[in-house]
Every structure is written in structure tokens, then in C-alpha cells.
Amino acid sequence: MPIDVAKATAAEPRTTDLAWDHKDVLLYHLGVGAGRPATDPDELRYTLESRLQVLPSFVTVAGGSLAAAGGLSAPGIDVNLAAVLHGGQRIELHRPIPATGKAVQTSRIAAVHDKGKAAVIVLRSEVADDEGPLWAADTQIFVRGEGGFGGDRGPSVRTEAPERDPDRTVEVATREDQALLYRLSGDWNPLHADPEFAKVAGFDKPILHGLCSYGIVLKAVVDTMLDGDVARVRAYSTRFAGICFPGETLRVRMWRADGRIQVSATSVDRDDAPVLADTVVEHA
């Protein structure tokens, strides 16, 4: 069996040195759609180094060390890249992310869940610098065809949207080259660039990275509901419920609810097909 659950979960935690600077942050922000319009003062806080704040979802690519990539190279894990999708993501912020930093990431396989037709690998990462903890992340990696081994199905938590109209709704257009730009932050999976590889994986054409949609949606929430202040974000979780093709427009619906914002993201171009679901931004 390609996934040896006992070996994967018993393996010693891995440590990785992370380093990033303002250029990495600027590139990431452009990759999730910042800078439109280019001279908008609200956009300059993402695109001009003298005003730079760091969108919290940057932690998923900080130092070029993608959590999903680390999970796929862990002991006991040997899977076909074409069968891999990002299932879900949660980040918790201990303090604002500096625009330039050095830190140490400690990661381990926390669990491997058996979903029947698929396996879900849960990678847990904790990151700290010289001043203490910076962030923690749980990454769920969905591997088609690797379930049915008799393991625990794991939790099945759904966050139902309130039965009322959203407090805010915004539409965010993605660029046709969005995935090509985003992948420069470190996710080189050919699923997002190579049409032939995408066909092998079952898609008509390359799809946008789930984590790119994740960043686009968080930016929309921060700009619309949190006064543009990234420091107010405490945690951000989602389930990748569907795909987005580069060039499509995302419809982001937001509901306020007791110190958190519930969010859904759908594709305008495909009759509100789900992209992100069970999405929550916890904030100060």
C-alpha cells in the first residue's frame, strides 16, 4: 500500500529553516490578485514595500516550504501526484507576520484518515522565530484512490451558512495567468500549468491552486470586513469544495457571527459552483 499509516504517524517531526523577505511577500500578494488598481492606496499596502503588511495566508508559502509538499515527502507516504488535491487548510496566527523573517518550522503527520475512495493526510506544522511562536497550520491532503484501508474516517465538521442574506458580497475576477503567477511562490505542481497533465488528472485544463483561492478570499474578507487590517486575523480555515479555473470570477459571501466571519466562495462563471466551503475567519 502506498501509504503506510503507522510509519507516517510514528515518524519523528521534521524541522525546516524558513526565510523570506519583502520580495517574497510582494510576489505572493500579486499571485493572489493584489495591485488592482495598481495605484489604489488600499492596494499599495500589499504591493509597496514602504507600506507593506503581510496577508496572513502568506504563511502557507513562507520560505518556499509548502506544507503539502512536506507531507508528500514524509516517511510512509508514496502517492501519485496526479491523484493529489488539497482538501482543507487551517492557520492560526500568534502575531502579525513580519515582512522579512527567519523561523524554524516543525512538522509531522498528525493523522491519515480513510474516506473510503480516498485517504486524507493531515500535516501539522508549527513555526517559531527568536521571539517565540509565529503560527501553526493544519494541512489536509486529499489522495484519490488511496482509501479503503480500514482506518479512522476522521472528523466531518460542516459549518452551515446562516439562513439570512450575507452581510457583504463581493466578486473578485481572477486572471487567466493567475496560476502561472501564483506558482512562482513555490507550488510547482504541473496540474496548475500543464494542459496535458491536467487532462491526465481529469480536468479539461489547468486549475487554480486551492491555496491561491484561499489567499484571494482572505484578502477579500480583510479588505471588506476587517478595515484592511491584516493584524486582526487570528485564524482562518476552509475546505476546498471545488475548483476554480484561472480567469473565472469568485463570488465571496460573508456573514458576521460572534468574533468570526463565515464565508463561502463560488464560481460566478459556473452557476455558483462551490470553490471554498466551511470557511471561517476568526478575528480580533
Image (tube, grey):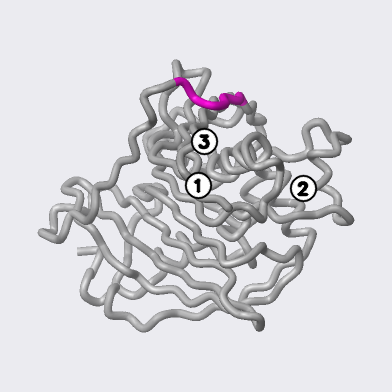
- Identify which amino acid the numbered label 3 is placed on: Pro
Q: Residue at x 63, y 30 (%)?
A: 174
**Mark 1 vs mark 3: in front:** 1
Taking depth in this image into account, of 232 and 58 the one nearest to the observer is 232
Are there few (<14), some (14-19), or many (20+) residues within 10 Å of tag 1? few
Instruction: Indicate which label's residue lies in the foreground, 1 or 2.
Output: 1
Residue at the spot x=29%, y=73% of the render?
8
Residue under label 1: 259
Residues at marks 1 and 2, CA–CA distance in whole angstroms: 25 Å
Measuring from the top left, give residue 188's x and y in whole percent: 56, 53
- Up/down of 85 relative to 42, above or below: below
Q: Quickly name the residue at label 3.
A: 206
Q: Earlier in the sequence, mark 3 or mark 2?
A: 2
Vertical position of residue 86 compared to residue 131: above or below = above
Residue 193 seen in the figure: no
* Residue visible at 65% across and 29% down in the picture: 176
> Residue 107 appears at what percent x and percent y?
44, 73
Q: Which residue is mark 2?
A: 46
Circle 3 Cα neighbour tier, 10 Å, few/some/many (<14 / 14–19 / ≥20): many
Q: Earlier in the sequence, mark 1 or mark 3?
A: 3
Question: Which residues are the magenta region?
Answer: 165-171
